[in-house]
Amino acid sequence: MYNIFSHIPASTVTDEQFSELLSKPGLKIERIVSTGQSSPPDFWYDQAVGEWVLLIQGEAKLRLADEPAARHLKTGDFLNIPAHQKHRVDWTPADQITIWLAIHHA
């Protein structure tokens, strides 16, 4: 048995921490830990698979390319991002730990 809150770093310094929790054909579940990271300027994720994300702890601003403003996600908020929906992380707070659960699906 494992715990989603185990082995959380106090700071991820410059990079987010990605931990793969489960991987099967057509499915990958990972925990992402952010402490102030955001996507580089003018960078957009464009993934070949869908991604369902749940903010387990903290907050973040997630922008979808076809929306005028970023969505301000808080603990408990979740969102399904379809395959090839361009998106980016505009902000995570540097003074707190943000934990995402990301489920990548075919």
Image (spheres, rainbow, N blue to C red):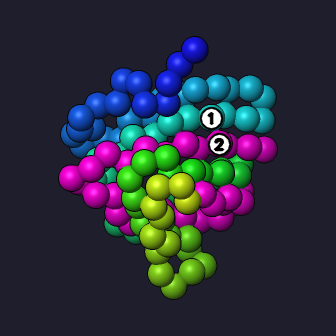
What residue is disc 1 on?
29
Q: On the rendered structure, is 12 left or right of 3?
A: left
Q: Would residue 18 be seen by someone viewing this image from the given angle?
A: yes
Give coordinates of residue 27: x percent, y percent.
73, 35
Q: On the rendered structure, is 82 left or right of 88?
A: right
- Which region of the structure is painted magenta? 78-106
Identify the amino acid type marked 2. Ile
What residue is disc 2 on?
103
Which residue is most to the bottom? Answer: 68
Which residue is most to the top? Answer: 1
Q: Is residue 53 above or below residue 19?
A: below
Q: Residue at x 31, y 41 (%)?
A: 15
Q: On the rendered structure, is 52 left or right of 13?
A: right
Q: Residue at x 55, y 59 (%)?
A: 77
Is the residue marked by circle 2 packed among few (<14), some (14-19), or many (20+) residues within 10 Å? Answer: many
Q: Is residue 22 above or below residue 1?
A: below
Quarter holding residue 45: bottom right
* Element under disc 2: strand
Instruction: Between residue 51 and residue 53, name the one nearer to us.
Output: 53
Labels 1 & 2 near each other (Cβ < 8 A): yes
Q: Residue at x 59, y 51 (%)?
A: 53
Give coordinates of residue 90: x percent, y percent.
39, 66
For marks 1 and 2 on the same chain, the one whose residue lies earlier in the sequence: 1
- The quarter of the rendered structure image containing the C terminus is top right
* Element under disc 1: strand
Q: Would residue 39 be seen by someone viewing this image from the given angle?
A: no
Label drawn at residue 69: none
Say if the magenta span includes residue 99.
Answer: yes
- The quarter of the rendered structure image containing the N terminus is top right
Q: Is residue 7 above or below residue 42?
A: above
Q: On the rendered structure, is 59 left or right of 3?
A: left
Residues at marks 1 and 2, CA–CA distance in whole angstroms: 4 Å
